Image (spheres, helix red, strand yellow):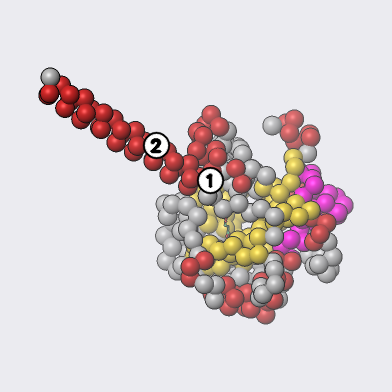
Amino acid sequence: MASRGKRIVQGLSFDSVALFGLVATCSGVMLEAYLTPDFECSTPSDACRGKDHPPLFLPSHIKQLNEVGYAVISRAVDMGVVTDSRIAIDNVNAKDWMSMNSQEIRQDQVAIIRDEDGVDEGIRKILSVLRGVAAQLDAAVPSYTMTHSHMVPLDCQVAVFSPGSKIGYRPHRDNATLGHELEKVGLVEYWRARPYRNRAVTAIMYLNDSDWGDDDGGELELFIGADEDDTVGNTAKEVVRVRPKGGTMVVFDSRRILHTVNPTKARRRAATIWIEGEEREEIRREN
Ligand SMILES: O=C(O)CCC(=O)C(=O)O
Ligand SMILES: [Fe+2]
């Protein structure tokens, strides 16, 4: 009798420990998914109109964005601004840098910077140029054909790859909608991706020296025309390689353009914003 009682107690305690372990693991996974940084505080693109005089992102760039899904502008800002921003970024407090994903996926460290009092003038200028893209998407003729009613985050991501990064950033799309349906990726991954589902257009400014060489690597590769379910770029009709020279701005469709960052031999710095927008009715019907 006594030994049966002991077995029940042992059994119960094992079950309780197992149950506790399961609940703790699930809570940990959900908490980690919940804590995905969210670039909130969007403002309508109108708020940025006129800040960037004259607008850099022109109707010809919008035409290109409509037709091929990307546009590259070299020397979008002068090198003095790039150098100031670079110094400001290198002075960001060590504790504010974080890894956004596994080192097997991306090897950069990122910090989130907001356009507010105290932000370095160079970074403020870069932010204003990047945010100005959104105002043009709504105001210019032709207007952007994929999305409308654009919203601009106050937050900008600065990302730094250390020299010798062997992986860079694996191929991905910035808007986790295509290929990320709930039934395909499961609840946790679907939830983790929620801040990325409204991203319409990615705008990046490189903050490196202007003499970034071929040997330095670190190119951004855009897989133009890749199939929706292609996650590596094999089906691309064309691969566009952008050298991350200081002052180069690149803008692309966050939903459709599969892209990767090549391994880099030099320290590589970039400032990125994600402009949000609603899909146009005709595009939604197509999907
Ligand atoms: O820095 C780049 O060129 C691209 C980085 C990127 O793809 C991202 O942050 O999502
Ligand atoms: Fe990306």
Instruction: Look at the image and say whether residue 73 sits in the magenta stretch.
Output: no
Based on the displayed image, in which of its 4 quarters is residue 233 positioned? top right
Q: Position of residue 194 (x, y in %)?
A: 60, 42
Q: Nearer the viewer, mark 1 or mark 2?
A: 2
Residue at image mark 1: 34
Point 29% across, 36% down: residue = 17
The quarter of the image holding the C terminus is top right
> Is label 2 in a helix, a strand or a loop?
helix
In the image, 244 versus 84, the foreground residue is 84
Q: Position of residue 241 (x, y in %)?
A: 59, 57
**Residue stretch rendered in magenta on the structure:** 129-150
Kindly tell me whether residue 251 is visible in this rendering.
Answer: no
Which of the numbered marks, if any, corresponds to residue 23?
2
Q: What residue type is disc 1 on?
A: Tyr
Point 34% across, 33% down: residue = 19
Q: Position of residue 149 (x, y in %)?
A: 80, 47
> Is label 1 in a helix, a strand or a loop?
helix
Mark 1 or mark 2, earlier in chain: 2
Q: Position of residue 154 (x, y in %)?
A: 69, 60
- Residue 199 vertical placement versus 156 (above, below): above
Q: What residue type is disc 2 on?
A: Val
Point 63% across, 78% down: residue = 84
- Residue 253 vertical placement versus 113 (above, below): above
In the image, 41 versus 261, the foreground residue is 41
Is the distance from the Cβ of mark 2 to the nearest ligand 1 atom less than 8 Å?
Answer: no
Point 78% across, 34% down: residue = 282
